[in-house]
Image (cartoon, helix red, strand yellow):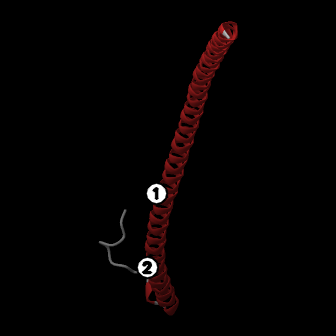
Amino acid sequence: MPRWPYKNTDLRHHTSKRRARKLKKWVTISTEAVLTTNAILALEAAKQATADAAAAAKAAKTAASAIKQLAKDKEAVQLQLRKDARAIAKTTRELQAAAERASGEAGKAAKQAERACIAADKIARAKQTTEAVAEALRAKEAEHAAQQLV
């Protein structure tokens, strides 16, 4: 049963000790209030620091991702350059081989032409020799005929 509707005959609450207890209670409450305010401020500061750290971590992650992407792009460019260099080297080798083949064929054609020229020269010399021999024979016959007439 509550005591408050009845007249309070207990005078303990009027004592100085009671007052001291009340004062201590209020001091404790106000100290707790100050501590709570400080705790709230510390909590807000911690929340802000956490948010700042999260933002910094996100920025660092974004930067790391960008760096990774740049590295990937650089690697892809280098790979493409290596592919292009290999293709150019292959094309150069093919062109060189084709040039060698063409020069070989040209050399072969030149040799054949030279052989034909040598053969024609031989034939011409033989003809000249034959003609010269025939001319010499005619000259000898004419000389012989001239001697016989004399």
Please give the name of the residue rendered at 46% of the width and 83% of the height, measured from the top-left corner.
Answer: 34
Quadrant of image for the N terminus? bottom left
Badge 1: few (under 14), some or many (20 or more) residues near its Cα, within 10 Å?
A: few
Residue farthest toward the front in the current orientation of the protein: 150
Q: Is residue 110 left or right of residue 5?
A: right
Snapshot quadrant of residue 8 = bottom left
In the rendered image of this protein, does residue 43 appear above or below residue 17?
A: above
Residue farthest toward the left in the current orientation of the protein: 5
In the rendered image of this protein, does residue 48 appear above or below residue 34?
A: above
Snapshot quadrant of residue 91 = top right
**Residue 6, image x, y percentages:** 32, 73
In the rendered image of this protein, does residue 86 appear above or below residue 1?
A: above
Badge 2: few (under 14), some or many (20 or more) residues near its Cα, within 10 Å?
A: few
Snapshot quadrant of residue 118 = top right
- Which amino acid type corresponds to the residue marked 2 in the rendered image? Thr
Task: Tell me the residue that label 1 is attached to.
Answer: 62
Q: Is residue 70 left or right of residue 101?
A: left
- Which amino acid type corresponds to the residue marked 1 in the rendered image? Thr
- Residues at badges 1 and 2 in contact (C-beta under 8 Å)? no
State how many labels appear: 2
**Residue 62, image x, y percentages:** 46, 57
**Residue 141, image x, y percentages:** 66, 8
Looking at the picture, tell me which residue is in the foreground, 22 or 119. Answer: 119
- Label 1 or label 2, whichever lies nearer to me, is 1
Looking at the picture, tell me which residue is in the foreground, 41 or 50. Answer: 50
Task: Tell me the residue that label 2 is attached to.
Answer: 37
What secondary structure is found at the residue carrying circle 2?
Answer: helix
Please give the name of the residue rendered at 60% of the width and 20% of the height, measured from the top-left corner.
Answer: 117
The CA distance from mark 1 to mark 2 is 37 Å
Quadrant of image for the C terminus? top right
